[in-house]
Image (cartoon, rainbow, N blue to C red):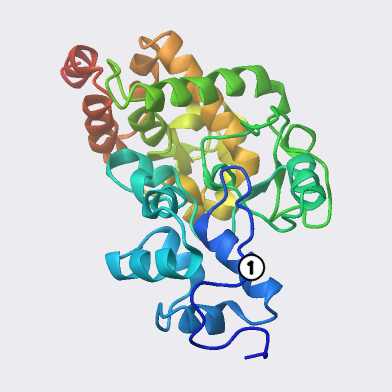
Amino acid sequence: MSDEIAPNAKPLPVVLKVARDELLSSWLGRHARFYGVSGSFFAKWLGLGDIRLTTLDYRLGLEHVARLTEKFCCDPGVLIGMTQISTLNGQVSNLISRGRPQQICYPCADRFAQDGAEGAVPKHWSKAWRITCPACGLAFTDTKEHRGSRATLIETTPFDDLWSEALAGEQIIERYLAQENSAEYSPIAVMQLLLVQTWKPIAPDREKPVVGWVLGTLFPDFDVRARPIKRRVTHAAIASLPIEFRPALLAGLARVVADPQVLRHLRSATLLRGQRNFDRFCQEANFASLATKLSHQ
């Protein structure tokens, strides 16, 4: 390690200001760059052991909190609040992207740089139900498919015609989470239902069906575009869905919530191998009475 700080220094001589809604790993990573060392070396020097900084966003032990509180002279509650741990229980954990965030808000990133927090990564860049930045309201940009481009999602998604409905779906999730899961129904279960895999004929004169999804019954173009990446389109991990498909999923959520009766049509178009999952998510969504009627048709 460089000579700027001794291995036994307590606390750190310089502590950087936390950016708005910043992830713990992002904050620690900025410190590592400030002191001119790698993230893994910095973690060991802090006494955190041989651990990746990003792991702390999801697994922050009491011993980690104690070491960080000592080194940074900060409130342990603040440290815990910078992680994703509070979102890992129940259905919400299915909506948090791990690793490098799929989305970025470049205007906010520019402001971070201007405020001396260049490279800061806020928690909401990992939220797989967002298509717009909650800080400034602008559309996110895809960090994976459009590297180096600042074109926003609304400019690059093939489902731009569904944007207004997708915004409604985004707000449905936000309201649900703000109510601390006390809503009458679960929109997260509805999203999982829409990603249940089914099989569909590709043309009336073809007997062999091809893979599709419940959402494709609402928006047939979804099936066509999703088939090449079918392994990433699963109800078991909504966060793995590429962000360019997210507007279609959110728009589908908005339609089902606006008119739950549409589930009748969706179920009838779902072949038997997918109906079990369809009915299960209907129950989890708490559309209980309708799901019961559907299953007896």
Q: Residue at x 45, y 9 (%)?
A: 258
Residue 194 % position (x, y): 42, 32
Residue 94 % position (x, y): 38, 45
Q: Is residue 204 visible?
A: no
Residue 247 % position (x, y): 61, 31
Q: Nearer the viewer, residue 10 or 112?
A: 10
40 with respect to 269 (left or right): right
Badge count? 1
Quarter holding the C terminus? Answer: top left
Q: Is residue 45 above or below residue 105?
A: below
Residue 39 % position (x, y): 58, 77
Q: Residue at x 23, y 29 (%)?
A: 284
Q: Residue at x 47, y 50 (%)?
A: 82
Q: Is residue 247 above or below residue 268?
A: below
Q: Is residue 66 above or below residue 269?
A: below
Instruction: Say which quarter of the image contains residue 42.
Output: bottom right
223 with respect to 295 (left or right): right
Query: Dot 1 lies on which element?
Result: loop
Q: Circle 1 sits on which residue?
A: 14
Q: Nearer the viewer, residue 186 or 275?
A: 186
206 with respect to 86 (left or right): right
Q: Residue at x 61, y 43 (%)?
A: 20
Q: Is residue 288 visible?
A: yes
Number of residues whose C-alpha sits closer than 10 Å to that of mark 1, classed few (under 14), some (14–19) or many (20 or more): few
181 with respect to 119 (left or right): left
